[in-house]
Amino acid sequence: MKKIFVSGCYDIIHAGHVQFFSEARALGDHLTVCFASDLVLWNHKERRSSLPEEHKLALLRNLTMVDDAVIGENEAHGLDFQDHFRRIRPDVLAVTEDDQYAEMKKALCAEVGATYVKLPKTPPQFPPVSSSGIVQWIQAPDVSPLRVDFAGGWLDVPRYAREGAYIVNCAISPTVSLRGWDYEKRAGLGGSGAWALLNGKSGVSSELNLGVGWQDPAVIRESGLCVWKSGDRPSLYLKRDGTMLGRRMALFYTGSDHDTPGVVDQERNYDLIEKAGLVAAEAVERNDFDRLAEAVAMSYQVQLQEGMQPLPEANGARGRKYCGGGFGGYALYLFNGATERDQFVAANEAARPIEPFIHPTI
């Protein structure tokens, strides 16, 4: 009888695991699957187990291609299965192409006379998923805020980052969900970041892959009124609840699409962007609304220099700017108070009130 052995975390059994088990079982006559114990999973991945160990044993042992399942409890990193491996003395250790512990496993195989076999990747029978991805999907929120940015935009794009500079933004309500999205799309409010969060993803990597910045998914996940350090990845410098912005913000839809990737390489006044970010960061630190309005006005001047069309005037508005940097979508207006804001909204079908959003648990 030719004995095959595989090991892994296998925290949540999914179709990708089943396909791998089937391919491994085809190498011989008996397949043993070893999965990481709760303690090993915590120590090695800092993750709680999604299912009790006895449930995993029952699931694995009842798969038609699995002949036995055992729990890997050895604390050696990457070799939690080695005690069972030495006891069973299998003929083959089957691994995936992305095995990170090849040399250690080959040495263990040599010790017991087993063959180390790396199974080639075959086309997945189902869309690929991972246990961590499933956990993220389960933990994904039902609703998400969007965001408005005040100053420092573009300095979250890694190639434009500046040491000592800041990006200032705020998560907003009304919120959105997979079933309800009461905003225009492609409108400069960080919708792709919200969509990622609602689908159990961080969104930061996907935004960077598009060649744009990380600020949208960062503040949407964090919530609140935030000051971020400019750099390659999100680094939160300061966070407020946004109380000073209550009943003072409105959005105005310009009627055209927002397209950040399309203008990311355009020339712009990065010195003034940095200055506006510094002013806005100071404003948040001091809870100074007037100073924040100054920073928004500075950001708007940068946008006009880029060639964006002037935005309509509004009585009582202390500052206005396009949301994001894409020449369209929504514009943000800051007002002296609720009366002026509500009058602006009542007089403009394209306007709507918004409020700062912070997660209730924070």
Image (cartoon, rainbow, N blue to C red):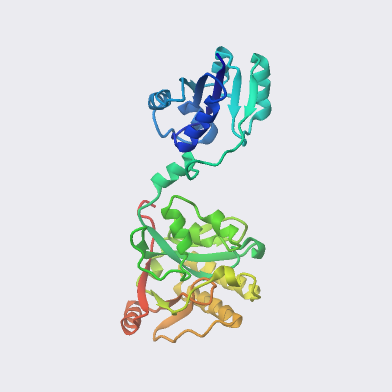
Q: Nearer the viewer, residue 29 or 262?
A: 29
Quarter of the image with the N terminus in it: top right
In this view, 362 is above or below 241: above
Q: Nearer the viewer, residue 210 or 345?
A: 210
Q: Position of residue 53 (x, y in %)?
A: 41, 25
Q: Quadrant of residue 304?
A: bottom right
Q: Nearer the viewer, residue 352 or 254?
A: 254
- Residue 152 in view, yes or no: no
Q: Position of residue 138 (x, y in %)?
A: 39, 44
Q: Looking at the image, which residue is at 64% across and 76% down?
A: 269
Q: How many marks?
A: 0
Q: Nearer the viewer, residue 91 or 240?
A: 91
- Residue 18 in view, yes or no: yes
In this view, 91 is above or below 312: above
Q: Looking at the image, which residue is at 64% across and 24% down?
A: 116
Q: Position of residue 230 (x, y in %)?
A: 60, 61
In this view, 42 is above or below 146: above
Q: Looking at the image, which residue is at 48% across and 70% down?
A: 188
Instruction: Give left or right: position of 324 versus 232.
Output: left
Instruction: Give left or right: position of 279 versus 141.
Output: right
Q: Quadrant of residue 244?
A: bottom left
Q: Position of residue 74 (x, y in %)?
A: 55, 21
